[in-house]
Image (cartoon, rainbow, N blue to C red):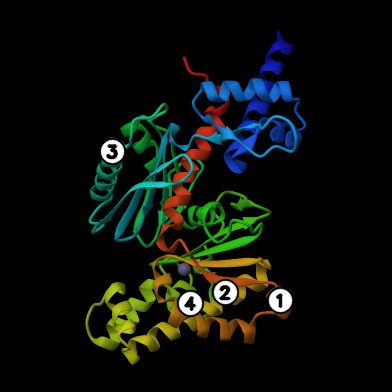
Amino acid sequence: MKQTGDLNLVKKINKTIVLHHIRTDSPISRAKIAEITGLTKATVSSLVNELIESSLVQEIGAGESSGGRKPMMLLFNGMAGYAIGVDLGVHDMLAVLTDLTGKVIRENRIQHHNESVEQVTHLLKTTIRELIETAPESVYGVIGIGLGVPGIVDEEGNLLFAPNLGWENVPLQSQLEAEFGLPVVIDNEANAGAVGEKQFGAGKDTANLIYVSIGMGIGAGIIIKNELYRGATGFSGEIGHISIQHDGPKCRCGSLGCWELYASEHALLEQAGRELGREVDLKSLLSKAESGDAGVIKLFERLGYYLGVGVVNIINGYNPEFIILGGRLAGGEKWLMKPLLDLLEKRSLPHPRKQLKVEFSELRDRSTVLGAASFAVTKFFASTTVSVERN
Ligand SMILES: [Zn+2]
């Protein structure tokens, strides 16, 4: 009996491997998969037939031949199902419906006032429901929901602490699972952003990268050897709370002089509010800078300098290949970049700096939402690929 169980398991593992290659390297032939995986052609053929049967893989026309009969090429069927991704921000949320390859089918951007946890979670549920209802017909339907949040999350998907939202101990995952009856993955927004960049953005070809999310706070998603580093208990990356002034102003985290008090969007808006004598938002600051307002440009340049102070610590501490700066402040790249790079040149250690790239995100403010959707897709394949035999 045991042996039968093991043989089934081996078959399931092999099927997962075959599907992985079709997802990442398609169009690909059966022969090529056999060559890469070391499985026999007969095994690959039989597994591919099952995957075609389960609608996850399609055959397309004949590919190039290296002599002999032209092979049929295999393609991953991204439209076999859909995923929801949400980036829950301090004042807004961005939500997308993607197919299984991460292609955005629909996007909703909603402001919220964070009057209460109930108000925001109600809005969150409404937004998710709207997206689910617009999902095209497909074999597997909506397969799950991924959510990036500005705080720390435990393994059960409880949002333990989100200082900039002012939330503590919110059981978001279980609430959403109960509401929709779908698998839900919740992670820190910077972790989701790092995965978004790694899968869909500038970080595709980089094994060691750090994604720095600059929003109302600052967080980092750390990818080491192609894997997200979560720390011993899942709370790594709270890099906005590195103290850059030992006796600086008090931070909401309890410490003093934290980096995000100087270099976040919140810091920029506070500083601009003081200097202009009224409340301003990022959009209006960006358009003022665009129209050549010297005072506002100076504010961005100073922010670039403060960003540099923290980035020096990241470079010296982690020696990454690539640092990607993301979040809405990426819109200020042309004023932030020069002071930032000047500071890195002066203060980071020369050896870790040598082969380092520092860039603003190409995905702009979509890194987190795409990463969140891809968490849902990954969970679907991890838990069900191997058992998606259709009835
Ligand atoms: Zn702090």
User: Which picture quadrant has residue 150?
Assistant: bottom left
Amino acid type, mark 4: Gly
Disc 2 or disc 4, which is closer to the eye? 2
* Circles 2, 1 touching at the beta carbon (< 8 Å): no
Please report the residue visible at 56 percent of the width from the left and 33 percent of the height from the top: 61
Q: Amino acid at mark 2?
A: Val
Mark 3 vs 2, N-terminal side: 3
Mark whose residue sits in front, 4 or 3: 3
How packed mark 2 is, by other alpha carbons closer than 10 Å (few <14, some 14-19, many 20 or more), is: many
Instruction: Pinpoint residue 137: horizontal percent, then vertical percent.
Output: 34, 30
Q: Residues within 10 Å of mark 4 (few under 14, many from 20)?
A: some
Label 1 element class: loop
The residue mark sitting in front, 3 or 2, is 3
| Residue neighbourhood size for the residue with mark 3, other residues' Cα within 10 Å, grouped as few (<14), some (14–19), many (≥20) | few
Q: Earlier in the sequence, mark 3 or mark 1?
A: 3
Q: Nearer the viewer, residue 35 or 262?
A: 35
Q: Earlier in the sequence, mark 4 or mark 3?
A: 3
CA–CA distance in space, label 3 to label 1: 48 Å
Front position in the image: 267 or 80: 80
In the depicted view, which residue is nearer to us: 307 or 28? 28
In front: label 3 or label 1: 3
Tell me the number on the disc at residue 257.
4
Q: CA distance from mark 4 to mark 3?
A: 46 Å
